[in-house]
Image: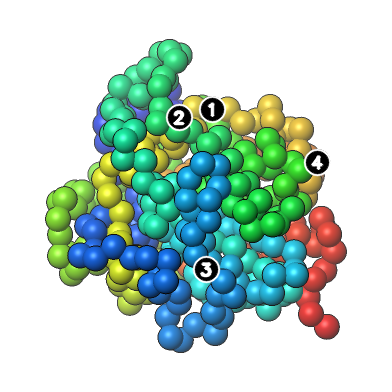
Amino acid sequence: MAVHSRRTFFPGWRALLTPLIMAWAVTTTAIAKANAPATAESIPSTSPKSPTMPESQGLVKANGITIAYESYGPKDREAILLIMGYGAQLTSWPIELCDELVKRGYRVIIFDNRDIGLSTKLDGAGKPDIKALIQAKMAGKPVSLPYTLDDMAKDAVGLLDALDIKKAHVVGASMGGMIAQIVAVDHPEHTLSLTSIMSTSGNPEIPLPAKPEVFANMPPPLPEKADTETIVAHAIKLSQALGGPAYPTDEQRIRDIVIRTMKRGGNDRGGEARQNAAVVAGFYDDRRPKLKTLKIPAVIVHGAEDPLMSVEGGKDTAANIPGADLRIIPGMGHDLPIALVKTFADAITSAATRATGDKTPK
């Protein structure tokens, strides 16, 4: 397979960037909105089988917007902030991972990024032209965005402030990994350690997508209005395309996530487009110079078979953070398989332990 950098590959794919790069929304592909909007009091927290229930949940003001969050574990513990990827609500974090981290002695915070789930929808900002954005970025021209990943990093920091958390171990997946990196480099006063999962450094030479052939047969985008079964079937197909060969898609799990997402209100095309614009710009914003200045423990996790974010992005991120620990997982694609929950928890707590010591309850 030919290797393409973003500079040479993007033009051929034109506006297909949205379904390609943004396929991480697979686990929350509930684009259609639920009939009744959810409220903070009606948010379904976890499945009945979940061993961990949130200590608190709700809506807080942060960085000028409202953010929906859930908090697991006692409030007097060190916090781990989990930042999700594009188009995905907090429902996409495996509750088993939250449970595992709580068992290891931490408090865990998950939340909806802006324009997703129950957090503020910036409808007044309009719907950006992604194709024009790509062309301008490639030409080195300035672009106007509704917001950037820097703004989303400030949201994360604002959430910590609203919850009276002075510092946290910051973790992000995919787009969330980029945001976590920005939190670490631009807000060191809030960051104890960094774990970046299936993300990239902003190096424009990293191939994207990693395996173009996987996306050639992607299902078409969902219609604006789709019934539940159509949405679930679409999410399963995307998950199968993005997953790695060693970890088959759990169809029932995808169904459960989509249903819970829809009960919380689903997502909307305008919000996803605005997040899309932020992450596309983020692909062109080279974070390597700032990453080289980090002085905190960092662990970089990447699937060896990731068809979306090239494993080279993980390697490059680790190579530019002094002392970073790189963990490449054989057979993993662009997802968070339940079978790897302890592997992810090991990575996160490895960085955390290096920063502040072991917190496992005795």
The foreground one among 297 and 158 is 158
Between the C-alphas of marks 4 and 1, the distance is 21 Å
Mark 4 Cα shell of 10 Å, populated few (<14), some (14-19), many (≥20): some
Secondary element under disc 2, as helix, strand or loop, is: helix
Sequence-wise first label, 2 or 3: 3
User: Does residue 178 appear left or right of residue 49 in this picture?
Assistant: right
Give amino acid for label 2. Answer: Ala
Disc 4 is placed on an element classified as loop
SS label for mark 3: strand
Is 93 located above or below residue 289 in the figure? below
Q: Which residue is mark 4?
A: 295
Which residue is depicted at the point 60% across and 47% down?
158
First along the sequence among labels 4 and 3: 3
Indicate the amino acid at tag 3.
Gln
Task: Name the front one of labels 2 and 3.
Answer: 3
For the N terminus, which image quadrant?
top left
Q: Is the Cβ of the residue at disc 2 closer than 8 Å to that at disc 1? A: yes
Q: Quadrant of residue 301?
A: bottom right
Taking the spot 80% from the left edge, 62% from the top edge, the residue there is 353
What's under tag 4, amino acid-wise? Lys
Q: Earlier in the sequence, mark 4 or mark 1?
A: 1
Q: Gap in Å between the C-alphas at discs 1 and 3?
A: 33 Å
x and y percentages locating residue 354 in the rendered image: 82, 57
Q: Is residue 214 above or below residue 360?
A: above
Give the distance between the C-alpha atoms of the residues marked 2 and 3, in whole angstroms: 31 Å
Q: Which residue is mark 2?
A: 281
Where residue 285 is drawn, which disc sits there?
1
Q: Quadrant of residue 46?
A: bottom left
Seen at 44% across and 47% down, the residue is: 114
Residue, disc 3:
57
Question: Dot 1, crowdedness within 10 Å: few (<14), some or many (≥20)?
Answer: some
